[in-house]
């Protein structure tokens, strides 16, 4: 492939240069930033804890944020056995994260991502330390995390184009200038040959400089037995990550945070089986824990991130913040595409994504009457996809560039002492282009030395939109808030080829609810009601004119429901419960091709004078389906999670805490065919438990996940007739030492 004329690869050097320039230009008149790095602060009490967040660029109580969200501290993540991104679906109802191959399909309230096409943008953005994450290389372990927030509903003001469904914010722990020398080490051992190490070291070098280093290593055997003609360790895990964070405060009024993180992961390839009722289902093994391949598999992923975060505050209290990032992510896959010994579909897939981004905020001082935030955003992505299908050589080369720009602002004004009006707006522009030469080549070295180009997908696309939110937040008392808002979300369209594009998705959301505490803060909770009007659903299906998979706007939807969350803390007993009920109706507006039966022939529809047997065309007529309306994809009607723990104080002063967690996720549709035999993920309920012994600096925790050893389908390869499975019963022990 010929490289695009881009400067993404120089992003690291540009950020380093910017850092040096900032040190020399920003003067001593700057004051310390009012935007702190810890986004969740928990104030201890004898009863329920008070959580504060800064998802709106300033610190607020969770109770005062006029929208539905889940906030999880590091202790919450440990208690709920959340170690990876896909575990969040069992800790935040309404959120689904399903296996989909190269990417994960993340949806909130039935809005997000249901296509594996690289031209389709996320509808639920994941942000790590303020940086938007490309969807590949997103299944890694959490380590040394400060907090995670799951924001539900469109986040058009602050999160922008990737937030029609919501956003997931992950923040890692940062150095602290007033902190002590110390850290922790956690050793892990479990079944399936699992062992690992997590550790962090905090270094307060001086009153002006501190560093934090964190590492993560995990290894595990596969959950699956290879019984095909090709031996494979698909589904195993060998993962390692290192994060280095540097904090410098040259004067009291200014700080710089620089972070570098690198990760490598090897899973041995995808472990899956053909979906029942599809072409190669006859070779399905008798157990989901047996895989039958006739070709070798492999999966290697890597990611590198550089982050620069600069904060300062003027004497009048106005704060400035600049966050710049450079990310490089790569995946190399070798897999048995049909997951059986019957077919010869072998695929080598190389996917890479480079991203640079900049966000600049100006934040007003805290005020009892009037507050405001303004900002600007820039993001540039280069996506490269190189796919080689065998045994007959078919190659797909894609070089895609995306540029997102945004200007945004929000004002908050107290109409009375207890009633606040917030108005936010964001202007988005989006440009996408596929480089000349991108397309599909067949028969390289067979039909011709360089093959024959059968499809050219070069072209360009652009769109823009104005997003925003209007909300009212009424503080009835210090312990009770009522809120309501109207918000607009947007997900960009894109390009299939020079002659084919698809439009942006849009959602208008209405939400109202209550947040508060009861019984002298022994209990806090929230209730939210929501209604979404969802337009231009982006669906991937076969374009009969070319025989290729293209994206089109095929449906509109209405989505409504209710969410409830309750947390109680009485003495040594803690309990929690949260649930989501979603009633959705997705209404396809055009017929689609049943790819479960037709496959992906990559040939155009036969004309009246052509015969399918000629090998130059394909007759799609028997596979055309007029889809009926159904629930939004990846949207369970009902889901909930609950947990309870009790802390016993032992005679030696140690604490022993047993905890049980149970999570239920209802059935989900994966395809607009709405065929129960091929397109329905069954509901599942998973039980987990921990038993924690803590004494001074030592903590020993035994854990078990999926204790009932439930077998369930966790997702499907998007646009392919194979399915993935959830992990079996796993258990182990963590030994942690704080120093």
Image (cartoon, helix red, strand yellow):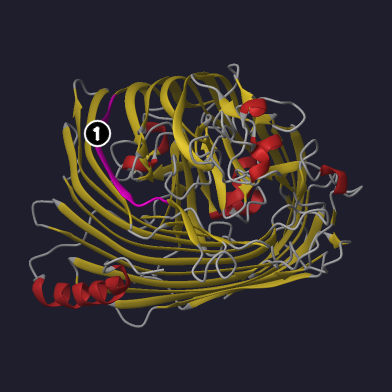
Quarter of the figure with the C terminus:
bottom right
Q: Residue at x 75, y 52 (%)?
A: 272
How many marks the image carries: the answer is 1
- Observer-nearest residue: 603 or 531? 603
- Observer-nearest residue: 592 or 24? 592
- Observer-nearest residue: 183 or 666? 666
Q: Pointer 1: what residue?
A: 465
Is residue 642 magenta-colored?
A: no
Q: Would you identify the image quadrant in which residue 601 lies? A: top right
- Observer-nearest residue: 33 or 122? 122
* Lateral position of residue 407 relative to residue 645, left or right: left
How many neighbours does mark 1 have within 10 angstroms: few (below 14), some (14-19), or many (20 or more)? some
Residue 22: x and y, percent? 16, 72
Q: Residue at x 33, y 45 (%)?
A: 498
Is residue 44 positioned above or below 138 on the image?
Answer: above
Residue 236: x and y, percent? 74, 66
Residue 635: x and y, percent? 59, 29
Kindly report the secondary structure that dominates the magenta region of the rendered protein: strand
Magenta residues, start to end: 456-470
Is residue 76 positioned above or below 650 on the image?
Answer: above
Q: Could you say whether the residue bearing mark 1 is in a helix, strand or loop? A: strand
* Residue farthest toward the right in the current orientation of the protein: 286
Q: Is residue 653 visible?
A: yes
Is residue 76 positioned above or below 654 on the image?
Answer: above
Q: Is residue 599 visible?
A: no
* Lateral position of residue 498 relative to residue 134, left or right: left
* Lateral position of residue 25 relative to residue 171, left or right: left
Residue 463: x and y, percent? 26, 38
Quarter of the figure with the N terminus:
bottom left
Q: Would you identify the image quadrant in which residue 266 lies? A: bottom right
Q: Would you identify the image quadrant in which residue 19 lies? A: bottom left
């Amino acid at each position: 492939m010929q490289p695009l004329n881009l400067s993404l690869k120089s992003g690291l050097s540009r950020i380093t240069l910017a850092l040096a320039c900032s040190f020399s230009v920003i003067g001593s008149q700057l004051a310390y930033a009012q935007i702190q790095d810890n986004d969740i602060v928990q104030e201890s009490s004898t009863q329920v804890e008070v959580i504060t967040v800064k998802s709106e660029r300033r610190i607020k109580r969770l109770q005062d944020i006029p929208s539905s969200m889940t906030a999880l501290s590091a202790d919450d993540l440990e208690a709920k056995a959340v170690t990876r991104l896909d575990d969040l679906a069992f800790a935040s109802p309404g959120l689904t994260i399903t296996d989909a191959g190269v990417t994960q399909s993340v949806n909130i309230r039935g809005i997000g991502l249901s296509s594996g096409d690289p031209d389709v943008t996320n509808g639920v953005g994941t942000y790590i330390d303020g940086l938007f994450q490309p969807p590949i290389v997103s299944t890694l372990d959490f380590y040394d995390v400060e907090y995670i927030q799951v924001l539900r509903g469109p986040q058009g003001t602050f999160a922008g184009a990737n937030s029609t469904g919501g956003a997931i914010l992950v923040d890692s722990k940062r150095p602290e200038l007033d902190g002590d020398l110390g850290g922790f080490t956690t050793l892990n051992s479990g079944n399936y040959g699992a062992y690992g190490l997590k550790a962090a070291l905090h270094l307060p070098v001086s009153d002006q400089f501190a560093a934090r280093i964190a590492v993560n290593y995990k290894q595990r055997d596969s959950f699956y037995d290879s019984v095909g003609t090709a031996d494979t360790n698909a589904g195993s895990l060998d993962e390692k990550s290192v994060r280095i964070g540097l904090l410098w405060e040259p004067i009291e009024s200014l700080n710089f945070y620089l972070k570098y993180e690198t990760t490598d992961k090897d899973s041995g390839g995808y472990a899956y089986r053909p979906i029942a009722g599809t072409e190669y289902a006859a070779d399905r093994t008798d157990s989901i824990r047996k895989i039958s391949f006739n070709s070798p598999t492999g999966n290697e992923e890597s990611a590198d991130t550089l982050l620069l975060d600069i904060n300062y505050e003027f004497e009048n209290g106005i704060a400035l913040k600049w966050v710049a990032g450079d990310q490089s992510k790569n995946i190399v896959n070798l897999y048995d595409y049909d997951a059986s010994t019957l077919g010869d579909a072998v695929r080598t897939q190389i996917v890479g994504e480079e991203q640079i981004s900049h966000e600049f905020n100006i934040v007003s001082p805290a005020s009892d009457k009037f507050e405001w935030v303004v900002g600007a955003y820039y993001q540039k992505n280069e996506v490269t996809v190189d796919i080689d299908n065998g045994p007959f050589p078919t190659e797909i080369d894609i070089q895609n560039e995306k540029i997102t720009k945004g200007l945004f602002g929000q004002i908050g004004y107290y109409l009375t002492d207890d009633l606040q009006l917030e108005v936010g707006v964001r202007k988005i522009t989006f440009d996408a282009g596929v480089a000349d030469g991108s397309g599909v080549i067949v028969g390289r070295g067979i039909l011709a030395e360089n093959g024959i180009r059968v499809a050219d997908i070069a072209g360009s696309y652009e769109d823009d939109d104005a997003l925003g939110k209007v909300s009212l937040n009424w503080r009835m008392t210090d312990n009770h808030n009522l809120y309501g808002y109207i918000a607009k979300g947007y997900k960009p369209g894109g390009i299939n080829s020079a002659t084919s594009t698809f439009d942006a998705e849009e959602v208008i959301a209405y939400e109202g609810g209550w947040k508060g505490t009861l019984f002298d803060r022994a209990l806090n909770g929230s209730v939210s009601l929501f209604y979404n009007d969802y337009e231009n659903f982006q669906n991937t299906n076969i374009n009969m004119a070319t025989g290729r998979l293209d994206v089109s706007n095929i449906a509109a939807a209405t989505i409504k429901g209710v969410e409830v969350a309750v947390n109680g803390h009485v003495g040594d007993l803690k309990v929690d419960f949260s649930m989501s009920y979603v009633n959705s109706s997705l209404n396809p507006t055009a017929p689609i091709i049943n790819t479960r039966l037709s496959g992906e022939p990559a040939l155009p529809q036969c004309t009246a004078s052509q015969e399918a047997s000629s090998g130059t065309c394909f007759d799609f007529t028997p596979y055309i389906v007029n889809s009926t309306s159904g629930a939004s994809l990846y949207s369970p009607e009902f889901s909930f999670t609950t947990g309870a723990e009790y802390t016993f104080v032992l005679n030696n002063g140690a604490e022993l805490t047993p905890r049980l967690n149970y999570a239920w996720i209802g059935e989900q549709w994966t395809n607009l065919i709405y065929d129960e035999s091929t397109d329905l993920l069954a509901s599942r309920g998973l039980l987990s438990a921990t038993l924690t012994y803590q004494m001074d600096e030592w903590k020993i925790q035994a854990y078990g996940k999926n204790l009932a050893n439930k077998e369930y389908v966790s997702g499907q390869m998007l646009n392919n007739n194979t399915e993935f499975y959830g992990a079996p019963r796993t258990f182990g022990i963590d030994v942690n030492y704080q120093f």
